Image (cartoon, helix red, strand yellow):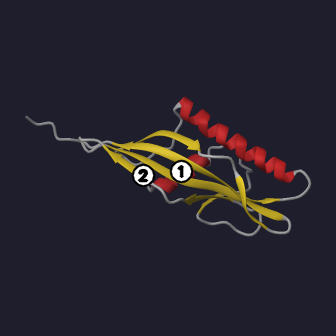
Amino acid sequence: MSDIKAVQDFLLSYQNLEEDRPVWVEMLGEKPLGYTVFLVPGKQVEEDILGNKTVSYPFGFGAVEVLADNSALQAAEFYEEFADWLDEQTESGNLPVLDTGKEAISIEALDTATIVERAEKTGVFQILCRLIYEVRLERNKTL
């Protein structure tokens, strides 16, 4: 399973998502029909002398939201609660399930949500996040 698929599956467990709005990967329509998780440049890999790696995997989460009356405030509050939820999941050890050999260490929002595109009655909100995981090499231990 790809890292982005693991993130997508994990985000589906967020209970404040609207039930009728799926979480897509790299796809977002013009209307507020779903959420998206998307790739972000900047993946960083640190390797120790044994070949084990710590990976910082950035991703974004967002959606088209209606902008009317108090809805922009409600959308901002949703993303703030989402960021808090990511922190709570890290603290409780409830993290994305990754491929064999990879172990998630933390997941977090890197900033507050912003409106990156505005139309007459809608706006695209996005929040940048990061998953940190370790890749451990299995060494044959024969002497």
**Marks 2 and 1, how far apart in space?**
17 Å
Label 2: how many Cα within 10 Å (few below 14, some 14–19, many 20+): few
Query: Is residue 7 visible in the rendered structure shown here?
Result: yes
Label 1: how many Cα within 10 Å (few below 14, some 14–19, many 20+): many
* Residue furthest to the top: 92
- Quadrant position of residue 36: bottom right
Q: Amino acid at mark 2?
A: Gln
Q: Amino acid at mark 1?
A: Val
Which residue appears at 74% of the width and 69% of the height?
Answer: 30
Residue under circle 1?
7
Q: Residue 79 in the image: x percent, y percent?
A: 71, 47
- Quadrant position of residue 121: bottom right
- Quadrant location of the C terminus in the rendered image: top left
* Residue furthest to the left: 143
Which residue appears at 29% of the width and 41% of the height?
Answer: 48
Q: Residue 41 in the image: x percent, y percent?
A: 50, 60
Q: Residue 23 in the image: x percent, y percent?
A: 64, 56
Q: Which mark is residue 44?
A: 2
Which residue appears at 73% of the width and 51% of the height?
Answer: 19
